[in-house]
Amino acid sequence: MSAFHDIRLKALGGQELPLADFKNKVVLVVNVASKCGLTPQYAALENLYQQYRDKGLVILGLPCNQFAGQEPGTEQEIAEFCQLNYGVTFPLGEKLDVNGPNRHSLYRLLAGEGAEFPGDITWNFEKFLVGKNGGVSAACIACPAILR
């Protein structure tokens, strides 16, 4: 198993969300926020998930409040916002840090020193495409081609 698949997260609501569950799937990891100009990307991400989930695509939304405080909600508020406004059905993890001394181990793997795409996450809705083998194959902020 890859280092990616060894990571364990918690879903909104507190249940375990082990990335091992996504082995042999392509995972689009996205740091999300509900009060950002990019928040409408939830709709495009949900459409992408509906279109390709049966072919092995997982969208993994990870709320983060590190960019201008644009994800201030509780886990329940985030879940309700995503469901009511965008009909989100893809997995959402608990709120986490993507930068700094408390950077979650997933983001240390995706963007830390020695990663394929190292550096700080620059804003909300930055995306990492992780292949079936757990390797990161692409990273982008807007990714317009992915969201079409």
Image (spheres, rainbow, N blue to C red):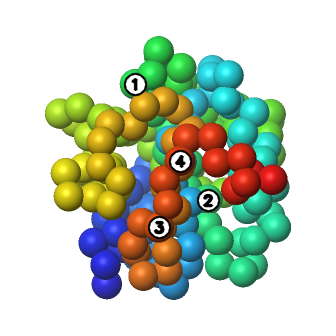
- Packing grade of label 3 (10 A; few <14, some 14-19, many >=20) is few
Report which residue position mark 4 lands on. 140
Q: Tell me the CA gap for discs 3 and 2.
A: 15 Å
| Disc on res. 66 | 1
Identify the image quadrant of residue 101. Answer: top left
- State the separation of the CA atoms marked 1 and 4: 18 Å
SS assignment at label 3: strand
Query: CA gap, disc 2 to disc 1?
Result: 21 Å
Given contact means CB atoms under 8 Å apart, are the residues at marks 2 and 4 in contact?
A: no
Q: Tag 4 or tag 2, which sits nearer the N-term? A: 2
143, 124: nearer the viewer: 143
- Residue 63 image point, x, y percent: 50, 37
Q: Circle 4 sits in a helix, a strand or a loop, which is it?
A: strand
Can you see residue 32?
A: yes
- Residue 137 numbered mark, or none: 3
Image spot of residue 13 (x, y percent): 51, 46
